[in-house]
Amino acid sequence: MRFAGVVRGTRGGRAAAGLACAAVLAGTLAGCSGRVAEDAAPPVASGGTAPSAPTPATHPFTGGTRGLRNPVLAVKIENTRPAMPQSGVTAADIVYVEQVEGGETRLMAVYSSRYPRRVGPVRSARISDLHILPQFGRPAFAFSGVQSKMKPYVRRAPVYDVSQENGGSAYFRAGPKPIPYNLYADPRNLLRLAPRAEPPRDIGFRFGPAPAGGRPTKTFTARWPSATMAFTWSAKRKRWLSSFGGRVNVGAEGDVLGGHTIVVQYAKTTRSKFHDFLGSYTPLIHTTGTGRATVLRDGMAYDARWSRPSETQGTTFTTADGRPMTFAAGQVWVVLVNDGRPYMP
C-alpha cells in the first residue's frame, strides 16, 4: 500500500530529496517500492511474547555457538571524537553505523552471544533505530533519552525500554569526560529490567565459506557528510580494523574496533520530522525495500543486493548472481550510508 508524502525544503534553502511515504497503518509500516517514507511510524508492539522457537544450532547474529538463547540487547553509543575510546563495542554481535544530525554518525550495538562489563558512552535514540529493531522481535533497548516528540513512538515500539529514564543504577557516569560523553551502562543490569526480552532469531544473515566473485580489497572507506570510517583488512587478525576520520579506532579495552564482516548497505536517507535543538533535521534511513551493498570479508569485497520486505522481517543479502551472500563467522558491522553521495537532509 502506498502513501502520499510531502516534499519539504532543507534548512538553508537546500531541497529535500524525493517524495515520501508517510506513516501509519495500525502502527506498522509496509516497505515502499519506488517511494520512501519521510516520516514513517515504526511497528507497534503487539503485546505478550512470541512462541518459543527451537534453539538454533548456531547463533543467527554471528554464526558461532555461544549464547544461543541469551536475550537481545541493543544500545545506542556515541560515535564522535569526544566520546572515544568507546566501551563494549568489541563484545557486540552486530554494530550498526547510522547517520544522525549534522552529518555525524552514531552506533547501535546489538548484544546476545556475550555481554561486556560496561558499554558507552550511551546516547539518545533516533527514529531510524525503531525501524531497524522490529526484526529482532522484542529486544531490550538502551539509550540515554529521546526528545519529547519521539516518546510516543518509543512507547508503541516492539522494544523493552531500558533507557536512562527507566534504568536507575544500571546507568552510571565514569571517567574524566564531560556530560554527555561519560554515561555508561551495565548490560546485565539492563537486562534485569527486561526479563522478557526475546532471544535471537533469524534476521537474514547467512554464514559460511566465502562465495566466488569477490575482488581483493585492502581498505574501504564509508563516507557521511561530516564523518568517515575506513575498514582495513588484517590477515594476521582475520578481521577488518576500523579507523575514524583517518585515525585508528581503538576501543577502551585496548583493541582496534572492527568486524569479521563489514556490510556497507546503501539505503535512501531522507528528512524526518524530528530535529535537534540547533534545528538540524534528523535523517530517516530507509532499511526496508531493496538496494545495493558492498560486503567485505576475508580481504575481499563483494557486490551484493539487500532485501527486507517488511520491518518485522530480516534483511537478506545476495551476490550478483543471486546466491546467498555468506558472512564470515564473528562480529558483523552494518554500515548504513546514503544511496548516492553523502547527503544532509
Image (cartoon, rainbow, N blue to C red):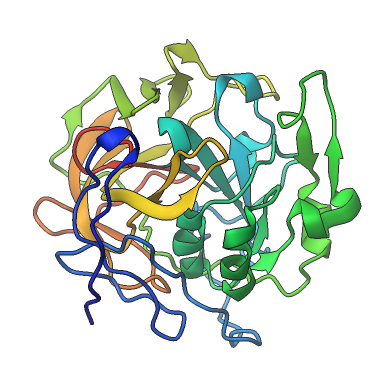
- Rendered view: 176 above or below 49: above
Q: Residue at x 35, y 58 (%)?
A: 206
Q: Residue at x 30, y 51 (%)?
A: 326
Query: Which quadrant holds the C terminus?
Result: top left
**Residue 159: which quarter of the image?**
bottom right
Residue 31 appears left or right of 333: left
Q: Could you tell me residue 300's position as x and y percent?
A: 25, 31
- Rendered view: 203 above or below 181: below
Q: Residue at x 57, y 40 (%)?
A: 277
- Rendered view: 147 above or below 172: below
Q: Which residue is at the front of the view, 146 or 182?
A: 146
Q: Residue furthest right?
A: 169
**Residue 70: which quarter of the image?**
bottom right
Q: Could you tell me residue 328's position as x and y percent?
A: 39, 44
Q: Could you tell me residue 79's position as x and y percent?
A: 55, 31
Q: Residue furthest front?
A: 13
Determine if residue 117 is in view.
Answer: no
Q: Which residue is at the front of the view, 262 or 299?
A: 262
Residue 324 appears left or right of 311: left
Q: Residue furthest left?
A: 321
- Rendered view: 343 above or below 314: above
Residue 146 appears left or right of 325: right
Query: Which quadrant holds the N terminus?
Result: bottom left
Q: Residue furthest top?
A: 247
